[in-house]
Image: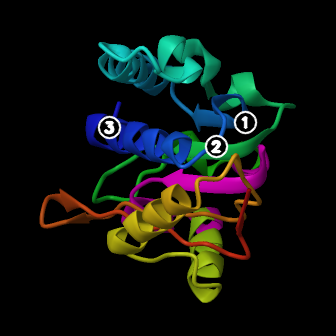
């Protein structure tokens, strides 16, 4: 499990939903069942906090199960408009476990129709050749930026008050441990907000 990463995923989901994305269109995918359980628990607690005292709470906060949080294996063969992927692995030796399996990587990265958010430690992931190639592609296409840019995107989306956010193409969150702090990055390639 990766508690810090799970908390960031929940923050991302909350931001995306607040910007107008429908919970039915969003999926959270992770390779480990322990991370699935942690994410579900954190999401349920956050929904209870947000729905408490609010008669106008959105349906996804009243019923946290609307947001699908599942393992890679459970998500195989299905898609969502936006996928948030939690990689979990975070170590200085670069051990990525079964994230190194290109077939699983394919499933992980192809479940999103319009938007993909990756939450993971870029240093650890870059030690695997498949992930390294993918991260390099993302950097070349400038879909990795800092956390201030993410907050600017969320503010702009809220200002536009969209009914639906689309298309969300190749969003990338890249979390790296820097002096024990985790940084957020997001990239946007060709996305726009329609209302």
Between residue 171 and residue 52, name the one nearer to us. Answer: 52
Between residue 127 and residue 111, name the one nearer to us. Answer: 111
Q: Which residue sits at x=30%, y=13%?
A: 53
74, above or below 91, in the image: above
* Cα separation between marks 1 and 2: 7 Å
Which quadrant holds residue 107? top right
Q: Which residue sits at x=52%, y=16%?
A: 64
Q: Nearer the viewer, mark 1 or mark 3?
A: 1
- Is 123 part of what is drawn in magenta? yes
What residue span does the magenta drawing correspond to? 105-130
Residue 165 appears in the figure? yes
Between residue 113 and residue 86, name the one nearer to us. Answer: 113
Contact between labelled residues 2 and 1, with CB atoms less than 8 Å apart? yes
Disc 1 on helix, strand or loop? helix
- Dot 2 or dot 3: first in sequence order is 3
Task: From the image, tell me which residue sits under label 3.
Answer: 7
x%, y% of residue 31? Answer: 57, 34
On residue 25, the disc is: 1
* Cα separation between marks 2 and 3: 19 Å
Judged left or right of residue 3, residue 146 is right
């Amino acid at each position: 499990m990766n508690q810090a990463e799970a908390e960031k995923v929940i923050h991302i989901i909350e931001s995306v939903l607040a910007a107008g994305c429908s919970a039915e269109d969003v999926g959270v995918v992770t390779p480990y069942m322990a991370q699935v359980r942690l994410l579900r628990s954190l999401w349920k607690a956050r929904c209870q906090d947000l729905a408490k005292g609010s008669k106008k709470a959105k349906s996804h906060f009243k019923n946290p199960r609307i947001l699908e949080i599942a393992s890679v294996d459970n998500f195989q063969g299905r898609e969502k408009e936006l996928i948030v992927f939690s990689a979990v692995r975070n170590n200085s030796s670069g051990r990525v476990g079964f994230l190194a399996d290109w077939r699983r990587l394919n499933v992980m990265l192809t479940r999103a129709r319009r938007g993909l958010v990756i939450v993971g430690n870029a240093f650890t992931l870059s030690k695997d050749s498949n992930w390294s190639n993918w991260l390099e592609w993302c950097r070349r296409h400038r879909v990795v930026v800092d956390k201030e840019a993410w907050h600017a995107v969320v503010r702009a989306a809220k200002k536009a008050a969209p009914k639906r956010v689309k298309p969300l193409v190749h969003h990338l969150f890249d979390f790296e441990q820097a002096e024990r702090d985790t940084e957020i990055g997001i990239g946007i390639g060709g996305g726009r907000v329609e209302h």
